[in-house]
Image: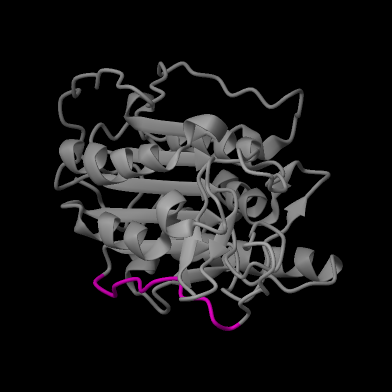
Amino acid sequence: MHNESVAGDRDSPPQTAVIPAKAGIQNHADNWTPAFAGVTEKVNTPDYSEAEHPDDFAVVVGVEKYAQDLPAAEFADEDATAFRAHLIALGVPARHIVYLSDERAGRSELVKNIERWLPKNVKPDSRVYFYFSGHGAPDPATGNAYILPFSGDPSDLSDTAYPLSRLYASLEKLKVHHVIVALDSCFSGAGGRSVIAEGTRPLVNRVKEGVVPRNGKLLVLTASKSDQTSGVLKDKRHGTFTYYLLKGLNGKALDSKNHVTMDSLYRYLAPKVEDAAHLDDRDQNPQLLPKNARSAENLTLR
């Protein structure tokens, strides 16, 4: 079982069976090594290694290039690849990580893996991670926020994209210990890692990102507020949010007990992202949802 206050102190049940590969799911061997197109940025490689937690699962999505005529979400693939490496270092078995990138990250794959694969395989003491790096989009008619899969069309979101509210509801239904979500995206339609249907205006102050329940199971880290844009650090080849997320996991977010918790991670990355955004003459304020969640203080990542 997961211990919520002490890192590396979870029980280690017998090794679970390898989940066979399924269509559209990328299963990788435990010795999988990420490739970063020659980049040597230190955050890409975890400098820690937790014991394996055989009941943990993750879905990692990175969409940089889109089928539609949309601007690329710069460095989204590298974001997702690096985060996957950190999940393995956090103890998630590589065979329990679904990794979807670009053309493999279609809407049907999101539905299948979030709504069928996870519920079928998780256990009560599982910890589940969901990570997305790519474009978000708002529905101009309703204000509802969507994450944009590879074939997502900002002018036809209901049929081609995945609602953020549906994501939260699906993950909340899982009969597990904790679910951790990290979104390096934005939903205003004002640029950065967000897009909007041609001919419509950004929905600043009108975006509905969905409600995160306050029961402590689901914790969400978002790259920015709903009316802001999420930027990148070109010299680091990462989204600004993901860069400091990875740096925090690598030790910069250690608390007084030498652990990284959800709370200490947020307290580290939020001001770093805000400062980097100010240098780029914009605002970007990461959010930890639900706000003031006491469970974030006790949920130890490493």
Q: Tell which residue pokes out farthest to the bottom in this image.
A: 205
Left or right: 12 in relation to 105: left
Q: Main secondary structure of the magenta part?
A: loop
Camera-side residue of 67 and 92: 67
Left or right: 205 in relation to 143: right
The span picked out in magenta is 205-215
Which picture quadrant has residue 140? Answer: bottom right
Camera-side residue of 234 and 112: 112
Residue beneath the point at 77% across and 66% down: 277
88 over 3 or under it: above or below: above
In the rendered image, residue 295, in percent from the top left (x then y), is placed at: 32, 68
8 over 18 or under it: above or below: below
In the rendered image, residue 47, in percent from the top left (x then y), is placed at: 58, 34
Residue beneath the point at 24% across and 48% down: 2
Queried whether the magenta region covers residue 263, the answer comes back as no
Left or right: 279 in relation to 41: right
Which picture quadrant has residue 178? Answer: bottom left
In the rendered image, residue 149, in percent from the top left (x then y), is placed at: 50, 45
Number of on-image labels: 0
Q: Note whether residue 302 is visible.
A: no
Camera-side residue of 284 and 26: 26
Quadrant into which the N terminus falls: top left
Q: Note whether residue 139 is visible.
A: yes
Residue beneath the point at 38% across and 21% down: 27
In the rendered image, residue 175, in percent from the top left (x then y), is placed at: 15, 52
Left or right: 299 in relation to 186: left
